[in-house]
Image: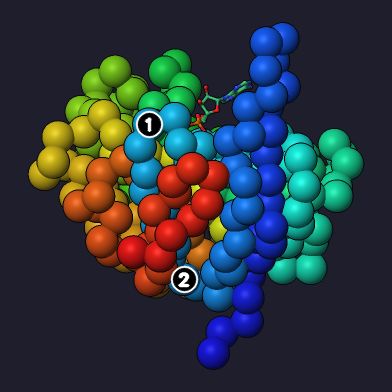
Amino acid sequence: MNEILLEVAKVRKVFTTVSENLEVLKDITFSAPAGSIVVITGQSGCGKSTLLHLIGGLEAVTGGVIRVGEMEVSKMGERDLTLYRRKTLGFIFQLHLLLKEFTALENVAIPALIDGVPKTEAFQKAAHLLNQVGLSGRLKHFPPELSGGERQRVAVARALINDPLLILADEPTGNLDEGNARVVQEQLFSLAREYRKTVVLVTHDRELAREGDQRFLLHEGVLHPL
Ligand SMILES: Nc1ncnc2c1ncn2[C@@H]1O[C@H](COP(=O)(O)OP(=O)(O)OP(=O)(O)O)[C@@H](O)[C@H]1O
Ligand SMILES: [Mg+2]
């Protein structure tokens, strides 16, 4: 049995607005062994993105504990959270968020360059990852010159470049047709398995949710195993 990389215990999230307190997550508990893939599905508005934001340290929990390795994310201050997001996490979103004035190769290399990796090495690594997602012929293309599926594959490569322990993917294939969605997700999962990355992926697509090592339905603030 692999060691646990991600532990989410009794996590609660309440959004306080002027008119009401909205308890989006009531009691979320699960753990992911290192190198495993967790897929969470559920209706629009059920709290999937909120859960990823909590794990990613983008929002604070109302209650409960989130641990990644030795780190207790739910207790960290801004400084540690910034480092955590930069060193430990890879994010993939529904909208790729690629920088449109940079090429595919540059987009993938940028997180490594920010992290102080020498230029030659960063670009070599970026080219290798782009090759692995089948884009060796598109290194010099700018995002508007790529198809939707190709852009998401660039985003997959970018999420891996800093060798994160944990990849958080929020509807990474939400904007793609069925065929492309499958290809992108398969590439993400196969790279995650090759590099032994832990993945938490959320999707409203029940079909795509079938591939995870653990699968949950998020409903009324609680996870139900599928
Ligand atoms: N900052 C906020 N303040 C108040 N309510 C919020 C806030 N962020 C999200 N919510 C509410 O929390 C609920 C869950 O939102 P969330 O974005 O997590 O849903 P989701 O499952 O990701 O939906 P989708 O599949 O449409 O992306 C929604 O009802 C939303 O309106
Ligand atoms: Mg969402």
Residue 30, horizontal then vertical, whole percent:
57, 65
Q: Secondary structure at mark 1?
A: loop
Mark 1 lies within 8 Å of ligand 1 (Cβ measured)? yes
Q: Quadrant of residue 114?
A: top right
Q: Is residue 115 something that shows in the picture?
A: no
Foreground: 126 or 1? Answer: 1
Q: Residue at x 72, y 68 (%)?
A: 69
Residue 28, horizontal then vertical, whole percent:
60, 55
Q: Residue at x 14, y 34 (%)?
A: 177
Q: Amino acid under label 2?
A: Ser
**Label 2 belongs to which residue?**
36
**Label 1 belongs to which residue?**
44
Q: Are marks 2 and 1 in contact (CB under 8 Å)?
A: no
Quick one: quadrant of the N terminus?
Answer: bottom right
Q: Which mark is residue 33?
A: none
Badge 2: residue crowd in 10 Å (few <14, some 14–19, many ≥20): many
Residue 192, horizontal then vertical, whole percent:
42, 64
Q: With 189 as the anchor, is 99 left or right in this view?
A: right
Q: With 34 as the anchor, is 92 left or right in this view?
A: left
Give the alpha-carbon distance from disc 2 to disc 1, as whole Å: 25 Å
Q: Residue at x 25, y 50 (%)?
A: 206
